[in-house]
């Protein structure tokens, strides 16, 4: 199997540890461009497109395989086996944070650390007090709109997801990214993303984890970051002053500063500048 072609894998930098960068729904690996050069100075970095996104091989997309996040986690572990050198750190945005959790569970101690940017184990509130940020009817309405008018949904949702009111060009970029995605693949991935419940998977996860949370995020509100921090015993919660769900794009310096401090702590001398 040609993994480089399947996931449009890009390897940069050199160092004793490997950082894997995995993007969120509707995006591709170009969304890491504001932070990747910083980490390439000291680490081996691997960025890639989820199958169905960006410049991935669309012929590799199998509806049955990618009907759960586990299919994407399987891909990630294949990439780790092929490209990793030294300890592995997963850096996942949004849904890719949960893909990283599933990959970590499959690997049983093989992941040195995780960085989750805007993660959510479950987007839907429940009657037991969990706050995911959305009512079930809200999510269903969102998915129904996506089914009936994908391009309209994209132009409406991208500015909400991106936030960054002072940088409208970022919202436009995300809109264009959504619109480049095959609508049928996007519809399936949206359902998998917004209907997944990974609370049992994050419960008690021992891997050292940094949760990077925007101070104002409609997609993953602060209560979600606090929930994860409470249920993962070796986690840290870093609050980044930012409006929107993509702080690695709209507040990249604050993100790299938080990640640097975490890597220095977790990787010892490997994390020194």
Image: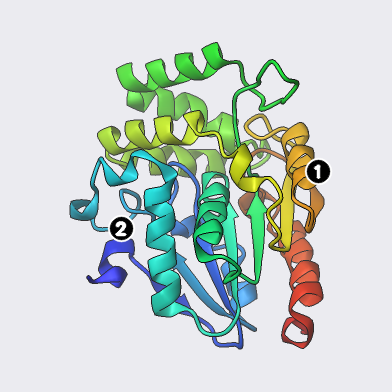
* Crowd tier of the residue under label 2, counting other residues whose Cα lies within 10 Å: few below 14, some 14–19, many 20 or above: some
Say above or below: 30 vs 202. below
In the picture, residue 184 is in which quadrant?
top left
Q: Residue at x 66, y 38 (%)?
A: 244
Q: Is residue 75 left or right of residue 159?
A: left
Whether residue 221 is situated above or below residue 126 in the rendered picture: below
Instruction: Give x and y (percent) for residue 106.
Output: 49, 60
Answer with left or right where residue 202 lies relative to residue 28.
Answer: right
C-alpha gap between disc 1 and disc 2: 37 Å
Residue drawn at x 78%, y 46% is 229
Q: Residues within 10 Å of mark 1 (few under 14, many from 20)?
A: some
* In the foreground, 52 or 164: 52
Mark 1 element type: helix
Mark yes or no: residue 219 visible: yes
User: Label for residue 230?
Assistant: 1
The one of 186 and 131 positioned closer to us in this rendering = 131
Q: Nearer the viewer, mark 1 or mark 2?
A: 1
Quarter location, residue 10: bottom left
| Label ID, residue 55 | 2
In the image, residue 21 lies at what x, y percent?
A: 53, 63
* Image coordinates for residue 270, horizontal then vertical, percent: 72, 85
Secondary element type, mark 2: loop
Residue 147 in picture, x, y percent from top left: 33, 21
Res. 140 mark? none
């Amino acid at each position: 199997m040609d993994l480089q072609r399947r996931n449009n894998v890009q390897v940069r930098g050199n160092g004793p540890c490997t950082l894997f960068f995995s993007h969120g729904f509707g995006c591709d690996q170009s969304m890491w461009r504001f932070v990747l050069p910083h980490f390439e100075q000291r680490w081996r970095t691997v960025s890639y497109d989820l199958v169905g996104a960006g410049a991935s091989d669309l012929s590799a997309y199998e509806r049955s395989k990618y009907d759960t996040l586990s299919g994407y986690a399987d891909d990630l572990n294949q990439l780790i086996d092929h490209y990793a050198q030294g300890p592995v750190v997963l850096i996942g945005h949004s849904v890719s944070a949960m893909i990283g959790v599933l990959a970590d569970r499959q690997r049983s101690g093989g992941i040195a650390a995780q960085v989750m940017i805007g993660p959510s184990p479950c987007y839907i509130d429940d009657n037991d007090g969990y706050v995911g940020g959305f009512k079930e009817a809200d999510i269903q309405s969102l998915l129904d709109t996506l089914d009936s008018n994908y391009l309209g949904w994209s132009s409406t949702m991208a500015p909400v997801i991106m936030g960054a009111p002072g940088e409208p060009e970022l919202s436009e970029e995300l809109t264009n990214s959504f619109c480049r995605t095959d609508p049928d693949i996007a519809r399936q991935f949206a359902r998998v993303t917004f209907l997944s419940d990974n609370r049992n998977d994050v419960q008690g996860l021992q891997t050292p984890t940094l949760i990077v949370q925007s101070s104002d995020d409609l997609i993953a509100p602060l209560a979600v970051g606090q929930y994860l921090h409470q249920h993962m015993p070796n986690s840290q919660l870093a609050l980044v002053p930012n409006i929107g769900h993509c702080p690695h794009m709209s507040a990249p310096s604050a993100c790299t500063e938080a990640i640097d401090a975490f890597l220095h702590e977790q990787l010892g001398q490997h994390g020194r500048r």
